[in-house]
Amino acid sequence: MLELRDITAGYDRGAPVVRGVSLTLAPGEAVGLLGPSGCGKSTLARVAALLHRPDAGTVVLDGTPARGWRHRAPREQRTAFGVLFQQPRLSADPRLRLADAIAEPLRATGRKDQIPTRLRELAPLVGLGDDLLARRPHEVSDGQLQRACLARALVLRPRWLICDEMTAMLDASTTAALVAVVESYRRESGAGVLAVGHDRTLLERWCDRTVGWAELGAATGMPDVA
Amino acid sequence: MASTTTGARGRRGGAPRRALRLRAGAAILAVVVLAVVLVPLLFPLDRQAVDLAAKLQPPSAAHPFGTDEVGRDLLLRCVYGLRVSLLVGVVAALVATVLGTAVGALAGALGGWADRTVMRLVDLFSSVPHLLLGIFIVAMFRPGVWPVIISVALTHWLSTARIVRAEVLSLRSRPYLDAALTGGASRWRVTLRHLLPGVLPQAGLAAVLMVPHAIWHESALSFLGLGLPAHEASLGIMANAARSSLLAGDWWPTLFPGLFIIVPTLAVAGLAGAWRERLNPRRRSELTL
């Protein structure tokens, strides 16, 4: 269970972007978060993934409140998340080949021995062949790069996937393929998915429930969800 | 029609000029490095040998650059002087770049009050003129090559620190660093694996651009009598000693050391310029692709 309780967050203490928002994500559940651009949903997603310290409120992971954010968060809490961002260009280190980018979390957590196995499992899943895996980000398309980012997000088998406008830069077929991979991972692992976006049709088809930003802002305390 | 041809010519004109600058710079540098390495091996003449009977001789077959006011061969002394200049230039630029990169990366990566404190210190150091600070540092030691290197390095890391910090700040907010954190990377791993490699091209360019600057600085310190001991061959010392004979109409002791300062520094600067032009479009394509 991932609980965001009464989160207030922003980049300037005087003017928070997110005010008193609460959201709960059960294991195996896919929640869509709909909102207009600039409303703060990405900030909320970053708070949920422990990448942005909120000004107030708590994030509770399976009953344990998060005490640190970014590098100060305990590693096992950080790696419980997989994140996907809107712009694959900015989300991949331009110097790493796709294979190295996907394997990087395994290297960072000292699990080098698992790299060949995990690469063999994940590459066909996201549709990346050996040729593409050997290329650097500037030599592949946005869609191919986002697939590599998805593989990287899944490589540590996260308990929660935070997809921040994951498909905003992509065409319909790539979107469908990526969502299918996320969905099969959710079914197989029981991970929770928080999908942030502004495309109501996509989110309503994809997710178990879709929450509008306005409903969240109005909500005080815990929203009435199962 | 006319506009297309001029446009095409303009585009074609840019590349050869760049290539020419690159080739000329590389060729001059190659000759200079060869000379500096080979001449001391091939001509084991004593560069300090004084021959008052042959003082201030104009260029001739025996002395292609002529002789100075105590009869020493100017070509040999110019080459030895250039050796000192290159040593000071390269070593000082390296030390300054390592120092500047470390300070800039630390300030940029830590952010907050650490960043503000470090950068205000950098501003403070920058507000003192380089040469004045350099003279102060040199004056604390006995004359020699190493005090000059230390002085030049300690006064020149500031600009590199600024460049590196700015680069780190621009890279810091990239989502791939967030992704690395979520992937379990420690702060050090993020800095060393993702942040520093992105900064190194800029730091390398700053280092190359600093070599000519450091050479000029060494010459200036030596000219003022604060660099190497007076008997050593240094281009700055030679230029200073030649001032009196220049007034008497003997131009060669001034001209040749001057050329030896100017030509290699221009060659290095040309190479750095070509590198910078290569760096920029690549970075632009990296951002827009």
Image (cartoon, coloured by chain):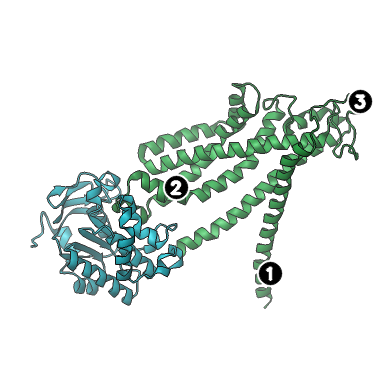
Tell me the residue that label 2 is attached to: B196
Q: Residue at x 40, y 65 (%)?
A: A133
**Colour in which the image shows chain A:** cyan
Q: Which quarter of the rendering shows the N terminus of chain B?
A: bottom right
- Amino acid identity at mark 1: Arg
B265 or A127: nearer the viewer: A127
For the residues beneath circles 3 and 2, the answer to whether they share a chain is yes
Amino acid bearing label 2: Leu
Q: Residue at position x 87%, y 26% from top?
A: B51
The CA distance from mark 1 to mark 3 is 59 Å
Q: Which chain is green?
A: B
Q: Chain of mark 1?
A: B
The residue that disc 1 covers is B9
Of residues B45 and A187, which is closer to you in this image? Answer: B45
Which numbered circle lies on residue B53?
A: 3
Q: Is residue A59 above or below residue B42?
A: below
- Residue at (46, 41) in percent of width and height: B104
Q: Secondary structure at mark 2?
A: helix
* Mark sitting earlier along the chain (1/3): 1
